[in-house]
Amino acid sequence: MVNLGSLLFCLAAGTAVGAIVVSRNGWRLGVRREEKAPPRTLVANLIRDHFRPVAIDDITISERSFPFRVRADLQRAIDRLFGSKTTIRHFCGVRQDYSHNTLTLSACIASGDHNPPVAVPPQYEEIDVGDEQPLRCLKNGIWFLEEGPNRSVVLLTAVERYGESTGIQFQIGTVNNADGTRLTQQFFRHLEESVLKAESYRGKILSLEQSPHSYS
């Protein structure tokens, strides 16, 4: 009887220890999984770091909207502009979950803890312009630019209205001074000149179509 009681006691103690070990291992696994989750990069932090030591209150934002039909010309304009004397310090896509409104630089800067815009890999859409290869057009993205001592940010995003995209919007944020004003004027002038030239479709036969789900 004594031996049987000792055996039962040892089995019970071993089960309890096993449960503790499993519990501890499960807790450790949970911690490790939580530590492996990649941190989100807030666009607001990227903008503040880009303009530092200039305060965000000293930044001015200007915008211009364009119809979807000139996406190809706008993409070519961006490729030429940002590949010349302007240095791209950083570039990324932008995402804000559960948002049905047009994303703006103001929303990126003043983001709170609830659903802030975060940096993501950029997304492109291939547009047929009648060439041998389609043109890759950016869906949305933000550039952190430097030209000499002057820094700026440019945000490209779709104009959203009641959940539908109605055009393309460019916003540029610069320091509120004479150089910032000059950069803004040069940027929009370059885009408008590219649209007026219409290089992507000039000399080609266009077929006008209407999508049943969206207007463009």
Image (cartoon, rainbow, N blue to C red):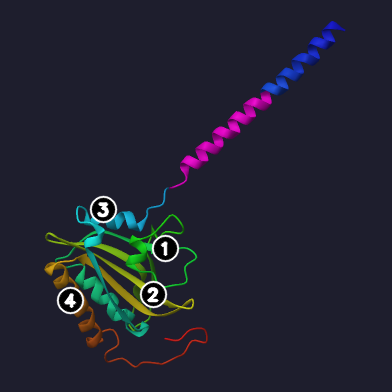
Depth check, mark 3 against mark 1: the one in front is 3
Q: Amino acid at mark 2?
A: Ala
Q: Is residue 23 magenta?
A: yes
Is the Cβ of the residue at disc 2 closer than 8 Å to that at disc 3?
A: no
Q: Which residue is mark 3?
A: 49
Disc on the earlier residue, 4 or 3 = 3
Q: Amino acid at mark 4?
A: Gln
* Direction front: furthest residue: 57
Is the Cβ of the residue at disc 4 closer than 8 Å to that at disc 1?
A: no
Give the quadrant of the C terminus. bottom left
The image quadrant of residue 95 is: bottom left
Q: For the residue carrying disc 1, how many other residues have a C-alpha within 10 Å: few (<14), some (14-19), or many (20+)?
A: many
Residue 24 position within the rendered picture, expressed as x and y whole percent measured from the top left: 59, 29
Disc on the earlier residue, 3 or 1 = 3
Q: Which residue is mark 1?
A: 95
- Predominant SS along the magenta part: helix
Taking 14 as reference, is 206 above or below it?
below
Is the Cβ of the residue at disc 4 closer than 8 Å to that at disc 2?
A: no
SS at badge 1: strand
Q: Which residue is mark 4?
A: 185
Depth check, mark 4 against mark 1: the one in front is 4
Disc on the earlier residue, 2 or 1 = 1
Taking 202 as reference, is 188 above or below it?
above
Q: Residue at x 40, y 92 (%)?
A: 207
CA distance separating discs 4 and 3: 24 Å
Q: Which residue is mark 2?
A: 158
Residue 35 position within the rendered picture, expressed as x and y whole percent measured from the top left: 47, 40
CA distance separating discs 3 and 1: 19 Å
The stretch in magenta equals 18-38
Residue 100 position within the rendered picture, expressed as x and y whole percent measured from the top left: 47, 71
